Amino acid sequence: MPWPAVLLPLAADVPDAPPSVKEAQASVTEAASFIEENWATWLSIGLRILLIVVIAAALRSAVRKALTKLINRMNTSAEAVEGTALGGLLVNAERRRQRSEAIGSVLRSVASFVILGTAALMVLAALKIDLAPLLASAGVAGVAIGFGARNLVTDFLSGVFMIMEDQYGVGDKIDAGVASGEVIEVGLRVTKLRGDSGEIWYVRNGEIKRIGNLSQGWATAGVAVQVKPSENLARIREVVQEVAGALVKETPWDERLWGPVEVLGLDEVLLASMTVKVSAKTMPGQQFAVERELRWRIKEAFDAAGIRIIGGAPAPADEEEAPADPAAAVAPPSALANPASPQSLAATPIPSPAGPRIAK
């Protein structure tokens, strides 16, 4: 039969209790009193930390979802314009997609760092930890890391601003100074270019000091034609205008040409030739194809019209040159051919002296 709890003797009432039991009872009593005095404070701190963690996680999730939704909306608008004529000329869906994803990745990373970092500092402050030494150490470490990795920081910041300012994108043909070619990938640290010969250039964004974008706005196709100075300039203008009128009516040149083909005039006049300059405004990146087609058609039209181009076959009406003097290829007589000449006498070997030789 169990005894009631009130009838059980305490260790203090036992006259022969050992000292270890009394010490254990004292420690337990002190621990119970300490817990009884501080449990409210601990509960408050725990609830505060839990609230900080929950709010930080919810805020981070909401910000990331909002940024992802914004990026998806930007990609959807780019895909909607891709099939139209405006999309084919001004919008590159892959370029818009990579640019929006890069910006979204940077914004999500920055938001996560700010929210979680702030939450961590608030948790440490709730635990009554002095943040002054920690912040001072973090500042010194940040300065040291920034000084050691300044090139990496420079590349990263340059990439962020290049993407946000839309200086170039996938599909653009650019001249970055250190390399030139078509952009195949834009990163926060490195930009990948494909050169004219097929090579791939990895260019650090921090090394790009100037950028020439050859794919934005419009381009200019220029053709220089050298003809004889005796040709009729009015006839040359008429033939070029006929070529231009036929070119703008054919596919795909009617879309690649954004302006009329103009004869700018004489670019250079020399004694043996004169240069006629032809120019046209074209779609970005299509100026080289237009130049090659213009040269082809102008050459055919000039041959059909009898207009002589420098470097071509001479026309039958050209003035015949006088026959060359056959004596011009004969070497002049040499003074050594005459044995009595001073040159021949000077070159004659000295004869050996007559008489017997004395052998040693």
Image: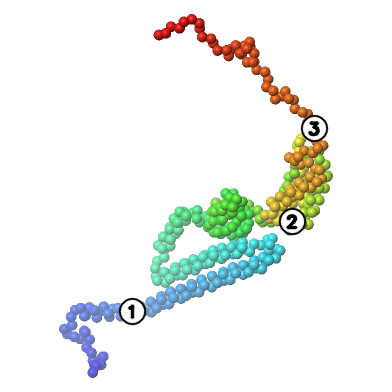
Write down the residue under mark 2: 253
Q: Secondary structure at mark 2?
A: helix
Write down the residue under mark 3: 320
Image vertical order of residue 224 relative to residue 72, above or below: above
Q: Which residue is painted at 73% across and 53% down in the image?
A: 281
Q: Amino acid at mark 2?
A: Trp
Image quadrant of residue 46? bottom left
Could you tell me which quadrant the N terminus lies in? bottom left
Question: Are the residues flagged by discs 2 and 3 in contact, CB closer than 8 Å?
Answer: no
Q: Which residue is painted at 79% across and 39% down in the image?
A: 315
Q: Nearer the viewer, residue 22 or 250?
A: 250
Image vertical order of residue 168 relative to residue 111, above or below: above
Q: Position of residue 294 (x, y in %)?
A: 74, 50
Mark nearest the camera among 2 and 3 is 3
Image vertical order of residue 45 relative to residue 301, above or below: below
Q: Amino acid at mark 3?
A: Glu
- Give the spatial CA distance, label 1 vs label 2: 87 Å
Q: Secondary structure at mark 3?
A: loop
Mark nearest the camera among 1 and 2 is 2
Query: Residue 148 vs residue 313: left or right?
Result: left
Query: Residue 63 vs residue 318: left or right?
Result: left
Image vertical order of residue 356 relative to residue 73, above or below: above
Q: Amino acid at mark 1?
A: Ile
Q: Which residue is painted at 46% across and 5% down in the image?
A: 356
Q: Nearer the viewer, residue 241 or 133?
A: 241
